[in-house]
Amino acid sequence: MKFFAAALLAVFSMTSLALADGGAPPPRMPTADGSGATTQQTETQAEPRTGLGTQEEFVTPTHNIGCVFTPEGGTATYMPAGGGPELSCDRVEPVYARATLGRSGPPEIDRNVTGEASCCSANPVLEYGDVWRRGPFTCASARTGLTCTRDDGHSMFISRRRISGN
């Protein structure tokens, strides 16, 4: 009988511990003004980011110009200024440069890109005469260069000879 009572006590103790570790509701604590009780939070967890997208890339046929599109809300590792969307295009030759169209305003053009060059992937290729569209951006590939326009009319042009925007 003692063995049975000891076993029952052990099972009861383990069940109580399991309930206290997550099976039972958290203890209630009085509010600062003493008017009621609130649930005490024993653990805090960061809210996971939702709606994350993936970046898309494309290059021109010469592989001299490559673009990266980041959707609104960004990705798990990159959040554009203003929350996106963003289209960033790099030119390799004759001098490395970058033009970026963000959510609003004219493109930012950096003719003095320093650090690691991120351009250009091998695929997919936006052939001459083809058009690419994502979010508010449309890009047209031509032998003379790449023109990318945002729905509000702001645009950027990138070629070996020049890089410009409005």
Image (cartoon, helix red, strand yellow):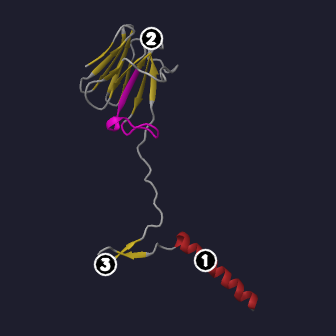
Q: Is residue 98 left or right of residue 150?
A: right
Q: Are marks 3 and 1 in contact (CB under 8 Å)?
A: no
Q: Nearer the viewer, residue 120 or 139?
A: 120
Which residue is located at x 39 percent, y 7 percent? Answer: 143
Residue identified by numbered label 2: 93
Q: Which residue is mark 3?
A: 34
Q: Which residues are magenta?
A: 72-89
Q: Amino acid at mark 3?
A: Gly
Residue at image location 71% in from the left, 86% down from the top: 6
3D distance between C-alphas at marks 2 and 1: 70 Å
User: Residue 144 location, x and y as percent?
Assistant: 36, 7
The answer to whether mark 2 and mark 1 are in CB contact below 8 A is no
Tell me which numbered mark, 3 or 1, is placed earlier along the sequence: 1
Badge 2: residue crowd in 10 Å (few <14, some 14–19, many ≥20): few
Image coordinates of residue 103 in percent, x first then y, are 30, 32
Q: Disc 3 and disc 2: Cα gap in Å?
A: 70 Å
